[in-house]
Amino acid sequence: MKKKVLLMGKSGSGKTSMRSIIFSNYIARDTRRLGATIDVESSSVKFLGNLTLNLWDCGGQEAFMENYFASQRSHIFNSVELLIYVFDVESRDSEKDIHYYQWCLEAILEKSPNAKIFCLLHKMDLIPLDQRDQLFAHWKNELQTLSLPLEPVVFPTSIWDETLYAAWSKIVHCLIPNIDTLQMHLDSFCEICDADEVVLFERTTILVIANAARVEHPDIHRFEKISSIIKQFNPSGREPSHFKSMEIRSGTFSAFIDVLTNNTYVMVVLSDSTIQSAATLHNINVARKHFKLLEIDRA
């Protein structure tokens, strides 16, 4: 199953850096050596084994942008599943950014009216902490108003913290065809394990696919922090991670991270100290066959 994803925005907004971190295992400081994208760089990225993301990273120089909306209009905007538009929040020419974004929306409405739209307000780390919420709220309101009748989902992001993984996890979530069925079975698995929470990660990107929780947790970025840790075990980023399993115990909780299927990891978190490790590992082992069948059904 193939899905066409457009990654667009002005030159220097950070498109190629975030793509390299998510799909090629770059760390933030290494993205400084990346050059500007010339025209369109198209790559096929395997996700969950049987889903292929045709990722079109579109160079943001003015000459290229003008071409996308004129001579290349059909080539670029036909059959698009997702448009991800990246804004540099410190851009000195935000009016032109908005202008190009609106041109993208016009082309999407004409060529791919059912495409989902995501806007990433990038480089938020450059904004003083006490101003970020207000700035994000302003941009979000403006973009949602300008985008009507389309309804973009807007995220604040930075390559230097967990917000990038949080945004991309939610973006790819909408591409998974049987996500409701997967969620239902994950909820059941969480109950069977008597777990506080169960989280499913895609094995190559370590993006969060789904989670089931019976107890609320105050850290909303906990999944993305774990993603960053696990990715360090995979130096190439192009194949499923070499990481296998991990068990963590403290005075208040136990956490198990293990391979679930060929394409996923599962994390099981428990606060009940009476539950033995062997019981949890047995539940994970029994669940493997079941979740592998769900992957076959998705194919």
Image: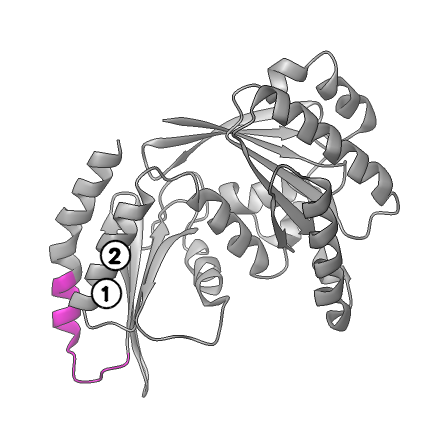
Locate residue 170 relative to residue 142 in the image: left or right.
left
**Could you tell me which quadrant the N terminus lies in?**
top left
Q: Say what amino acid the circle numbered 1 marks.
A: Cys
Locate residue 61 relative to residue 238 in the image: left or right.
right
| Residue 113 in the image: above or below residue 134 | above
Q: Which residue is mark 2?
A: 186
Outermost residue to the bottom: 251
Is there any visible trace of residue 276 in the rendered image?
Answer: yes
> Picture quarter containing residue 98?
top right
Outermost residue to the right: 92
Locate residue 57 relative to residue 236 in the image: left or right.
right
Q: Position of residue 49 (x, y in %)?
A: 32, 35
- Taking depth in this image into account, of 203 and 151 the one nearest to the observer is 151
Magenta-highlighted residues = 271-283
Q: Are the residues at dot 1 and dot 2 in contact (C-beta closer than 8 Å)?
A: yes
Is there any visible trace of residue 25 in the rendered image?
Answer: no
* Residue 277 is inside the magenta segment: yes
Q: Position of residue 292 (x, y in %)?
A: 19, 43
Q: Residue at x 29, y 58 (%)?
A: 266
Q: CA distance from mark 1 to mark 2?
A: 6 Å
Q: Position of residue 234 (x, y in %)?
A: 42, 50
Q: Residue at x 77, y 32 (%)?
A: 100
Q: Which residue is mark 1?
A: 190
Q: Position of residue 192 (x, y in %)?
A: 16, 66
Neighbours of disc 2 within 10 Å: few (<14), some (14-19), many (20+): many
Neighbours of disc 1 within 10 Å: few (<14), some (14-19), many (20+): many
> Picture quarter containing residue 287?
bottom left
Locate residue 226 relative to residue 177 in the image: left or right.
right
Q: Secondary structure at mark 2?
A: helix
Q: Secondary structure at mark 1?
A: helix
